[in-house]
Image: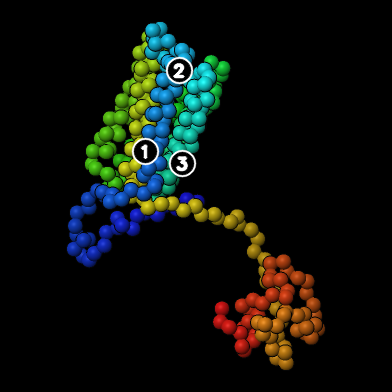
Amino acid sequence: MLALRPDPRKEETGGPETALAPVLPLRPSMWSYLSFLPIFLALWANAGVWIVFAVAVVNGSVNLTHGFPYISICGSYPPQSCIFSQVLNVGAAAAAWICIVRYYQLRDWGVRTWLNKLTLWSGLFCALGTSVVGNFQEKHQKPTHLVGAFLAFVVGNIYFWLQLLLSWRVKSLPQPGEPWIRPLRLGLCTLCSLLIVAMLVLHSWPLRSAAAACEWALAMLLFVLFGLFAVDFSGLDGCTLCLRPAPGPVPSPGPSPSPSPRHPRRCSEPASLAPVEEAGWSRPRDPQEEPWGLSSPRDCAAGPSCPAV
């Protein structure tokens, strides 16, 4: 379970005067390391795919005189295919972590569980598709590559539409960022949807260079949408990973005889079976109890000179 820690510097304090004050959008005074994760993803992915394009042009893998290439065409031949795979794998891991943090943030804001989980899974499938695109090049595994492209572009666009819907549901809560962040996301999501339709139509005509330009623009906009999560994460100080033990049977405690008054038990004395033998009965050792020969707070209560626990 991931627990998010809100930034204590952004908590409002005061008396009744502050309770009557209007609620304003939160403006971060200092950004945490979680805010730099979306920025890193946006910069890493944008720089990575253009480096792949530059290497492909330099070594002659693509010929710009024949038309503008798709992103996948640039990353289909070595050595840029290795760079392409590494860039998208790191980007997919960062995108998955961003989706998980965003899920827990929306959960703390009171978003319904089923809708929040649906959004989370769409983001994780987008990250999975990005990794598939990088590892299954179009030249060698075209069907698998196209499935990954569908997850990365189409499901990724659906993820940001769902994020826009969820942010609209919690609009009454004070959220980080300026008021124009939500209209900006609305415009970017709309433009991504139009680019997907235009890319498919132009590819089927075929106007491959125009379709490739739409693909490049779509990828850049999706990276920018991921980078905008830096504004939402600016209100977080950090996160903590909590482990929850699995439920199991609770052992019933066995009868424990009281120590003999003639032999008071002290913490410095080793444990012994003498009180049990004097009582005239014996019992098997319970693995859940303290090992015999070690003192415990229960044993200390029997001795008058034991230190407080």
Question: Callout 3 environment at 10 Å: few (<14), some (14 to 19), or many (20+)?
Answer: some
Q: Is residue 245 visible?
A: yes
Which amino acid is tagged 3? Trp
Which amino acid is tagged 2? Ala
Rounded to the nearest angstrom, the CA distance separating label 2 from label 1 is 26 Å
Q: Is residue 295 left or right of residue 49?
A: right
Taking the spot 40% from the left edge, 43% from the top edge, the residue there is 102
Numbered disc 3: secondary structure: helix
Q: Quadrant of residue 201?
A: top left
Find residue 119 and name its label.
none
Question: Callout 2 environment at 10 Å: few (<14), some (14 to 19), or many (20+)?
Answer: many
Q: Position of residue 277 (x, y in %)?
A: 80, 82
Q: Position of residue 214 (x, y in %)?
A: 35, 19
Find residue 56 and name its label.
2
Q: Earlier in the sequence, mark 3 or mark 2?
A: 2
Q: Is residue 117 left or right of residue 142?
A: left
- Camera-near label (2 vs 1) is 2
Q: Is residue 126 left or right of residue 259?
A: left
The answer to whether marks 2 and 1 mark residues whose Cβ atoms lie closer than 8 Å is no
Rounded to the nearest angstrom, the CA distance separating label 3 from label 2 is 30 Å
Q: Position of residue 158 (x, y in %)?
A: 40, 31
Which amino acid is tagged 1? Ile
